[in-house]
Amino acid sequence: MKIIKNKFLLCILLLLTGVSGYCDDPPPPEEIPPDLPINENINILLFIALLFGFYIIYKHIQNKKASI
């Protein structure tokens, strides 16, 4: 008899917790944060990063030639 009581109590408990989840109010809508200044000049930043990458590769090749 005790096992049946435990199963019944567990079923009721699970059903009630599911219902209480639907009863909550929806969360308030979040405000959209303002754009960061980096978003405006992302193309310039990518171009500078590309140039810097070419510079590093060029320096690496020059050092490799000098060591041979």
Image (cartoon, rainbow, N blue to C red):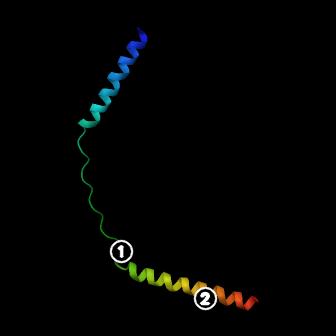
Of the numbered discs in the image, which one, if any, rests on residue 58?
Answer: 2
Could you classify mark 2 by the number of other residues whose Cα lies within 10 Å: few (under 14), some (14-19), or many (20 or more)? few
16 in relation to 5, above or below? below
Q: Nearer the viewer, mark 1 or mark 2?
A: 2
Type of amino acid under label 2: Tyr
Residue 2, image x, y percentages: 42, 10
Residue 65, quarter of picture: bottom right
Give the residue at x 25% y 38%: 24
Query: Answer yes or no: do the residues labelled 1 and 2 have beta carbons within 8 Å?
Result: no
Residue 59 is marked as none
Q: Is residue 15 above or below residue 27?
A: above
Q: Which residue is mark 1?
A: 39
Where on the picture, by quarter, is residue 22?
A: top left
- Which one is nearer the viewer's eye here, 47 or 3? 3
Quadrant of the snapshot with the C terminus: bottom right
Tell me: 18 left or right of 65. Answer: left
The x, y position of residue 4, in whole percent, is 39, 13
Distance of mark 1 from mark 2, alpha carbons? 29 Å
Give the total of numbered labels. Answer: 2
Residue visible at 40% across and 16% down? 6
Residue 64 or 36: which is nearer the viewer? 64
Q: Residue furthest right?
A: 68
